Amino acid sequence: MRIGSNNLTYPFDNRPKPAKRIEVAPGVFWLRMPLPISLNHINLWLLEDDDGWTIVDTGMSNQETKSLWESLLEHELDSKPVKRVIGTHMHLDHIGLAGWLCRKCQVDLWMPRAEYLSCRVFSSEMLEPPSEETTQFYKAAGFGDAELSVFHERFQARSNFMTPMPTSYRQIRDGENIRIGDFEWTVMVGTGHSPEHACLYCKELNVFIAGDQNLPRITPNVSVRPDQPSSNPLGEWLTTCEYFKNQIGEQVLILPSHGDPFYGGPLRLQAIIDDHLVSLEKLSDYCNSPRRVVDVFPTLFKGKIEDHNLVIATCEALAHLNYLLGTSQLSMGTDPDGVKRFQRS
């Protein structure tokens, strides 16, 4: 057990090796899969039932991860079958292999409705060039020809990381109890990071499968999507963080999708809230004169914004600007060429 620099307690000294598992609580096993992106890993979870297994999240689709899953299914499941796959939310690192795994194991995908339907829309739109409305969304944020060229190039490349979704699913809902083996897991849904992000809480085990809802070292991305340009996901996210902070105690073991399992969930959620509030204050001050979305990156991000993170930075910056619009701290105008500019009220 070790105490991190952020005052969280990390109870495990080792991480699972590829295609291997580590038991973190009775019947709860930690898997770790590589990701072909800058965020280089994802944690996945196996829950043991009397007569099978539940998989929570899948990783991205590529040949390396498929091979690791094939090895794991053959050697690590004690000759018991997979009974279901649960997807916490729509992002590719969590759901990219859901269709492949469900078909391979001949089981249903369990997801909240908004997440499943978003996945279906998302996977469909990746097969076509971006729409004029989507292109206009990024023009309004301040993209010029060079940035739009990068966006168009990367838009359809995402489809390489996702297998076709199952054409049916089993809906899970906030507050629903799912019995797996000897234990009952309660679905807790958060919003802001994605439409209906499902977490799983087992009160008896004192374990919380957090997905991206509570990460120990990084702040989850909160973004405005082109199909809802005036939405306020950051407002939803901060409300969810406050709610979960009061529901999950300090001694609950948090199983995050990135980083190591830890104790101190409420402490970390408060730090995430505080980080956003500081960013919002800086952003408000910076908008003392009209700013495009792409102008505000230095106030929100420590790292350099380059081709690989331009889109995600733009969508997260807009989430912060829309939050300040919603609280009347900023006003917004639109140039004759359609570019949005934000200024402190």
Image (cartoon, helix red, strand yellow):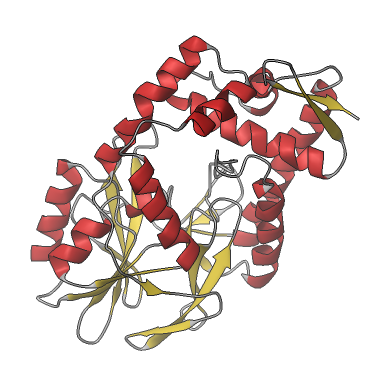
Q: Quadrant of residue 296?
A: top right
**What residue is at 69 percent from the left and 65 percent from the top?**
243
Looking at the picture, tell me which residue is in the foreground, 188 or 128: 128
Whether 7 is drawn above or below 82: the answer is: above
Q: Position of residue 242 (x, y in %)?
A: 71, 60
**What residue is at 61 percent from the left and 70 percent from the top?**
248
- Viewed as shown, does residue 191 lie left or right of 335? left
Whether 342 is drawn above or below 216: the answer is: above
**What residue is at 77 percent from the left and 28 percent from the top?**
283
Q: Position of residue 52 (x, y in %)?
A: 21, 80
**What residue is at 58 percent from the left and 41 percent from the top?**
223
| Number of numbered discs | 0
Looking at the picture, tell me which residue is in the foreground, 4 or 195: 195
Q: Quadrant of residue 263?
A: bottom right
Looking at the picture, tell me which residue is in the foreground, 215 or 98: 98
- Viewed as shown, does residue 159 lie left or right of 342? left
- Viewed as shown, does residue 284 lie left or right of 293? right
Q: Position of residue 136 (x, y in %)?
A: 56, 26
Q: Quadrant of the N terminus?
A: bottom left
Q: Quadrant of the C terminus?
A: top right
Q: Position of residue 285 (x, y in %)?
A: 84, 25
Task: Answer whether residue 37 is visible to the viewer in this image.
Answer: no
Task: Answer whether residue 48 is visible to the viewer in this image.
Answer: yes
